[in-house]
Every structure is written in C-alpha cells, then in structure tokens.
C-alpha cells in the first residue's frame, strides 16, 4: 500500500516570498507509476499533480543528470512538489487546506495538509543572526527544492543529505537591489559538485512542453563555489526549461578560489536590478581573515538582447547543487541603493548562452 509523505508534515506555514507556494514530498510504496495524482485546494476542483516516474538507478550526478520530465526538481521515484500560485483565487489569508490524492494498483492514498498563509511580504532588512526564536525551518524560509533543517542548538541552517540535484531555501521576500552576508561551512566539499552558495532567486517557469511541474530556473544572481577550486556567478532565465527565451550568463572560465573542509567562511553577495543592467557580484573569504576588497565574480546582463526577458525582482535564498550538507548562519539581508555600485559599461558584459548551448557543466 502506498502512502503520501509531505517533507514538512501535515501542518505547514508560508509567507509571501515567491510566486508559488511549494509543498515537496514523496509517495512511498509505489510499485510503478501512479494511475492518477491530483490536488484540491480548499475543497475546490481537482488539479493534476506531477509525480516522478523515473528511478534514480546509479546516475552519476557529479557529471550528468537523470533524463526525466522534472529535469532537476525530483531525484527519487515517487517525489513530487505541489506548486500553488500566490495569487490563486482559492488561496486565503490564514488557514487553508490542501488535499493530495494518488491512485495506484487499484488503491487510493490521500493526504491532508493544513497550512497558514500570510500574504504580507517580509521586511527587506532581515537579521537572522539569532535563530533560536524560530521553531521550524518554515518560519525561516520556503523550501523550493531539496530539504533543509534548522539546528537551533548550533544556531545554523543545514542542507539535508544527500543533496542532489538541487536544494533551495528562499529566505527573503521579493525585492530589487539587495545584499546578503552570512557565514558558511562546508562539511564534505570533496563529495560535492557545487557547494552552493546562495541565489537571488527570480522563480521557476514552465518547461516547454509543460509537464505539470515548473522546471526552468530563473536567477537574478547566483554565487557558486566549487570543490575543484573554482567560483562562478550566474544570471539566468528559465534554465533547463527548453523555452525559446531561455538564457544564461556565467563566469566562464570560473574564477579561482580555495575552500577547506570544516573551515568557516564569510560571504558578501549583492545584486543590482535596474532598467539599464542587472548585476551580481560576490566575495568569499576565511572568517579569521580580513574581508578582501576585490570581488571573486562580478557579472551583468548588459549584452542580453532587448527582446529577452529580464528580471525585475528576486528573493534571497540558500542554494546548493550536489554533495553533502552545507551549514549557513549569521544571515543578514538589506536593500541597496544604486549609487553603492560603480557604473559599468553595458558592452563590457559577457555574451549570454541560449538554451542548452553552453560550454562546461553548467
């Protein structure tokens, strides 16, 4: 007999951080693909739910991906991620009910999730240096991919192993130019593909063709450290979506850095969003050393064609791609003024890559 197991239980809570509320989980006990899977919000009409039907059988996640309609969203057979638009007419401030039903092998499993929805955005200035006031990870942020845990005794957030393919915990509400600073520690860097670090997430978009789960990653500015000694920044729209508008700009070849297992580092991660150029930059340095003046990566979209979609806002989140748990703490967010960035010539930017026509494993 199969059963539906939401990653964060049957009582959940959400703040307005993203375009969609997301409810990850897994259907355990399936012998094969389900005959039918659906959701109902607050007793409304049924809607289809994507449940992963491809097994993870020896996929080399460090060098390739599983070929599945869900792209990088669902690793395991039976995984799902319910997505409810924040402006869904059936969604109400306060208490809500989500019903999930999955039919297989002549039997139907049901699951009811009761959740609270607060549509008010968070303050653009956040101080998460003390996590002891929170009782669950959903008070701190919204999980989009993978899973994260709140360790109150250690005053940190930890990604849940194994991390593959992506893990994303969105912490801030949507905003424009912003800065995030935080402390990070890598527990097992040699078993990772990308160590994170963080993303100013602009949302997920539908794939082409649609498949019931949004697969196109949009980033207004990602910061990535690699155990190989490299670092990259990304800007992207609809990465992995297959949409005609899909594009990405990345530090290529990667910048050079060095990180060590168990050592604590500090990160300063900034984005600039305006009508002329979108820009991302970050630096990472050992906690016991002075902050450097140079940026490890600094990229912008000045050479993006005018007819391509550009980001108007983004939400800060903790990000990791592959590997063993990473730990984040002392997270602080603040809005930035445009004059805190020195001007750049739009023509000085990198050429964007379109669709999957890009070198390297990114």
Image: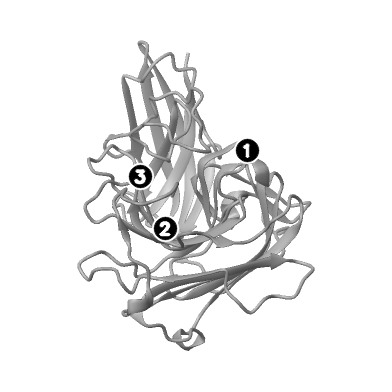
Horizontal and vertical percent for residue 330? 69, 64
Q: CA distance from mark 3 to mark 2?
A: 15 Å
Which residue lies under the disc numbered 1? Answer: 161
Is residue 89 in view?
A: yes
Across and down, in percent, residue 342 comes to 47, 86
Q: Residues within 10 Å of mark 2 (few under 14, many from 20)?
A: many
Q: Which residue is mark 2?
A: 18
Q: Residue at x 32, y 78 (%)?
A: 347
Where, by quadrant of the figure, is residue 30 drawn?
A: top left
- First in residue order: circle 1 vs circle 2: 2
Left or right for 71, reference 265: left
* Dots 3, 2 in contact, CB < 8 A: no
> Which residue is tagged 3?
215
SS at mark 3 in the image: loop
For residue 303, side relative to residue 54 (left or right): left
Q: Quadrant of residue 77?
A: top left
Callout 2 secondary element: loop
């Amino acid at each position: 007999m199969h059963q539906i197991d939401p990653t964060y239980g049957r009582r959940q809570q959400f703040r307005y951080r993203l375009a969609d509320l997301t409810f990850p989980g897994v259907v355990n006990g399936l012998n094969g693909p389900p005959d039918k899977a659906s959701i109902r919000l607050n007793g409304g009409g049924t809607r289809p739910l994507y449940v992963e039907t491809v097994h993870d059988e020896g996929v080399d996640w460090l060098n390739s991906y599983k070929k599945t309609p869900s792209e990088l969203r669902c690793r395991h057979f039976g995984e799902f991620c319910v997505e409810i638009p924040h402006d869904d007419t059936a969604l109400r401030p306060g208490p809500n009910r989500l019903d999930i039903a999955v039919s297989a092998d002549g039997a139907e499993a049901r699951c009811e999730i009761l959740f609270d929805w607060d549509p008010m955005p968070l303050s653009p200035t956040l101080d998460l240096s003390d996590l002891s006031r929170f009782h669950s990870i959903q008070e701190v942020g919204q999980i989009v991919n993978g899973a994260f845990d709140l360790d109150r005794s250690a005053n940190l957030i930890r990604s849940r192993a194994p991390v593959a393919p992506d893990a994303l915990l969105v912490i801030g509400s949507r905003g424009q130019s912003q800065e995030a600073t935080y402390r990070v520690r890598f527990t097992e860097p040699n078993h990772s593909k990308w160590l994170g670090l963080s993303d100013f997430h602009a949302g997920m978009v539908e794939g082409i063709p649609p498949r019931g789960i949004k697969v196109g990653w949009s980033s207004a500015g990602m910061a990535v450290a690699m155990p190989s000694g490299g670092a990259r920044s990304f800007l992207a729209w609809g990465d992995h979506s297959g949409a005609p508008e899909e594009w990405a700009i990345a530090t290529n070849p990667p910048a050079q850095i060095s990180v060590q297992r168990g050592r604590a580092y500090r990160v300063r991660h900034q984005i600039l969003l305006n009508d002329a150029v979108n820009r991302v930059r970050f630096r990472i340095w050992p906690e016991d050393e002075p902050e450097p003046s140079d940026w490890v990566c600094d990229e912008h979209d000045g050479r993006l064609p005018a007819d391509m979609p550009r980001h108007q806002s983004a939400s800060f989140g903790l990000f990791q791609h592959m590997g063993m748990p990473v730990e984040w703490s002392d997270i602080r967010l603040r809005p930035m003024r445009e004059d805190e960035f020195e001007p750049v010539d739009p023509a000085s930017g990198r050429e964007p890559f379109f669709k999957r026509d890009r070198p390297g494993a990114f």
